[in-house]
Amino acid sequence: EAQVTQNPRYLITVTGKKLTVTCSQNMNHEYMSWYRQDPGLGLRQIYYSMNVEVTDKGDVPEGYKVSRKEKRNFPLILESPSPNQTSLYFCASSQRQAQGYTFGSGTRLTVV
Amino acid sequence: DAKTTQPTSMDCAEGRAANLPCNHSTISGNEYVYWYRQIHSQGPQYIIHGLKNNETNEMASLIITEDRKSSTLILPHATLRDTAVYYCIVGSGGSNYKLTFGKGTLLTVNP
């Protein structure tokens, strides 16, 4: 089944403890992207990647890192999480100029 | 990026067509119009996209005006499971890799 898989689905962590949210797609898509969703603010793009080793900042990149070493994987790294990064995170992938993004099921992160 | 304007909420009776409008008056010539929906806190689901011509797929139809300043998403026979927030988005710079989501329209399908 074609899908975008995020792990974990739920995560509670403490301030400052580095964490990684994984994202993997099995559709050979070139484009991948991370979004966060907060009440009243909607979905905001964090980072995106147009292909392996090609990444760029979205609208809210502060406090996040990404890497794209393989086409299928696009992990989101929080080096030193803070409570304002408590959010619902979505990973998505897309083929260029094609069907639009396929989104993962989301990761609900709580930083205490 | 072109901005979009959508009504905050709409209601529709089950079995009837749901017509969701979107204004994108500043759209440029190479920008696509995309529609997504999000049911509760699930990941957004791609519905349809178009550039100039009307489009139809198994989920919906997209009608884009000739001047491309507005569009309408049509769900031909709405069901209770179509209750969701619907987002109209204009793709950045003709590429679809950067999509800016607005607040969307909450469509409530009533029995």
Image: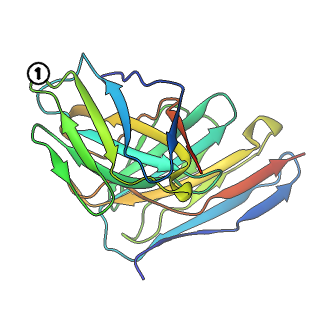
Which coloring applies here? Answer: rainbow
Q: Nearer the viewer, residue B79 or B83?
A: B79
Inspect this view and state whether residue A46 appears: yes
Q: Mark 1 highlights which residue?
A: B67
Chain that bears disc 1: B
Query: Which quadrant is the N terminus of chain A positioned in?
Result: bottom left
Residue at the (79%, 60%) spot, across then down: A11
Measured as percent of width and height from the top left, residue A4 is found at: 48, 69
Label 1 CA crowd tier, 10 Å (few <14, some 14–19, many 20+): few
Q: Nearer the viewer, residue B72 or A86?
A: B72
Residue at the (20%, 38%) spot, across then down: B63
Label 1 sits on a secondary structure element that is: loop
Q: Nearer the viewer, residue A7 or A66?
A: A7
Say above or below: A49 vs B107.
below
Query: Which quadrant is the C terminus of chain A positioned in?
Result: top right
Measured as percent of width and height from the top left, residue A57 is found at: 45, 38
Residue A100, by quadrant, is: bottom left
Say above or below: A67 vs B75.
below
Residue at the (36%, 69%) spot, across then down: A71
Measured as percent of width and height from the top left, residue A102 is found at: 41, 61
Residue A42, by quadrant, is: top right
Residue A77 horizontal side relative to residue B54, left or right: right
Residue at the (51%, 44%) spot, across then down: B13
Residue A12, by quadrant, is: bottom right
Inspect this view and state whether residue A61 appears: no
